[in-house]
Image: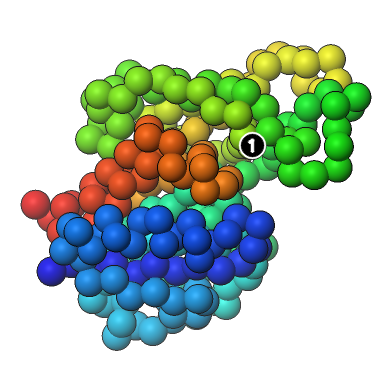
Amino acid sequence: MPDALVVRGGWEGHRPVEATELFVPFLKSHDFDVRISGTPAVYGDAALMAGVDLIVQCVTMSSIEPEALAGLRSAVAAGTGFTGWHGGIADSFRASSDYLQLVGGQFATHPSKEPGRLCGDETDNFLPYAVNFTPLGREHPVTAGLDDFELTTEQYWVLHDDLIDVLATTTHPVRPWHPWQRPITSPAIWARQWGEGRIVVSTPGHSLDVLQHPTVRTVIERSMLWATRTASES
């Protein structure tokens, strides 16, 4: 029976408890023994981490102690899978460059509506956009067979390195109220090999309704199965 560690916390706007609870039944239905932690400090427990096959993280912003980060990096390099969505993995521990190197991509912004339509709440950053699968994504086990899809929610602009395998992208168009002068394409879903471990990041997932979108949910669930140590060793 594989062991999954769900680590949640950080900024409450992403509803880390409710969001992760959407996926706990899926893990249990696939025979994972699920442990839940409300703090990334658990990564510093070397004995516990040695037996973890999969980490599902939902910790937006927040901070991490050096010992915990070292434990996370060591576990992934040794074969533990690491996955998550949106700010819970792509906007975690902003002050830690070693974490950013591990994940391979970092949230930079989510562009807003035009100034005349702003109302001062989170919907100011809800834009209609498309997620388009790459040729690699159309063959990769996490995303094979899925069709391009559209969402109206935060569209992540991501800074990234070229060690990631981009499975899907999204393009930020030129709009007169934004300062960029040409369309910007960002990775929306990516996979990454780190030592013996597999990492998958899905940027859609700001709210529970987005996580329940059929394609978003399928990607996240497949990511859990593909990244887990037992899968990578099979």
In the rendered view of the protein, which quadrant contains the N terminus? bottom left
Residue 46, located in which quarter of the rendered image?
Answer: bottom left
What secondary structure is marked by label 1?
loop
Count up the numbered dots.
1
Tag 1: amino acid: Glu
Q: Residue at x 34, y 70 (%)?
A: 5
Residue 175, located in which quarter of the rendered image?
Answer: top right
Q: Nearer the viewer, residue 150 or 85?
A: 150
Q: Nearer the viewer, residue 149 or 71?
A: 149
Q: Nearer the viewer, residue 169 or 152?
A: 152
Q: Quick check: 146 above or below 104?
A: above
Q: Residues within 10 Å of mark 1 (few under 14, many from 20)?
A: many
Image x and y of residue 230, in percent: 15, 59
In this view, the residue farthest toward the left is 234
Q: Residue at x 73, y 32 (%)?
A: 111
Image x and y of residue 158, in percent: 60, 37
Q: Quick check: 230 above or below 146?
A: below
Q: Which residue is mark 1?
A: 154
